[in-house]
Image (cartoon, rainbow, N blue to C red):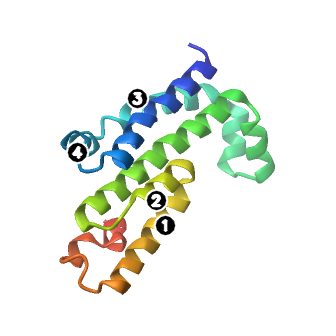
Amino acid sequence: MTISQLFDIANLFVLPFWALIILLPNWKVTRRIMESYIPFLPLAGAYLYLFITSITLENAQALSNPQLTDIARFFADETAAATGWIHFLVMDLFVGRFIYWEGQKTGVWTIHSLILCLFAGPMGVLSHILTYWITKAIYPKFPANEADTSPEQAMSR
């Protein structure tokens, strides 16, 4: 399998999970799948494989004390770029899963934050936090048990 094929497969692999949490968030199957860490294993395995194959002694040395020019040079390599991209896929899906579960626990609307997270992970996180704060400001008694469900507390666990 080529790096390009692995890249393409990884991009397609995450889409069903995103479709489930965005389009069918309350479906029993979605909840069961998103309870599991199994969706992350193939992606993490692909990442590990690419990471190991893209690291050289020179790269490791440069990345141990990263400078922007070293990072740019590292990601100019196709294998390193695929490694970085799969890193984004894994982490964005993991954060999307967090947002999904917070929405399930609190009842806070998440579809917009999940869509943003799919395309730009940190913007989805920011959107979710702002949505939570705005919801709390408008409806102070929402959710019923804030101590168990606030994003701040969940992030600090």
Relative to 139, residue 50 above or below: above
Q: Which residue is mark 3?
A: 42
Q: Earlier in the sequence, mark 3 or mark 2?
A: 3
Q: Which residue is mark 2?
A: 112
Tell me what residue is drawn at x 49 percent, y 66 percent. 127
Mark 3 residue element: helix
- Where, quadrant-wise, is the C terminus in this rendering? bottom left
Residue type at tag 3? Pro
Relative to 69, residue 111 above or below: below
Tell me what residue is drawn at x 73 percent, y 35 percent. 58
Viewer-nearest of labels 4 and 3?
4
Seen from the viewer's position, the closer of residues 112 and 78 is 112
Mark 1 residue element: helix
Disc on res. 27: 4
The residues tagged by marks 4 and 3 sit, at their Cα atoms, a distance apart of 23 Å
The residues tagged by marks 1 and 2 sit, at their Cα atoms, a distance apart of 8 Å
Mark 2 residue element: helix
Q: Does residue 55 appear to the left or right of 62 in the view shown?
A: left
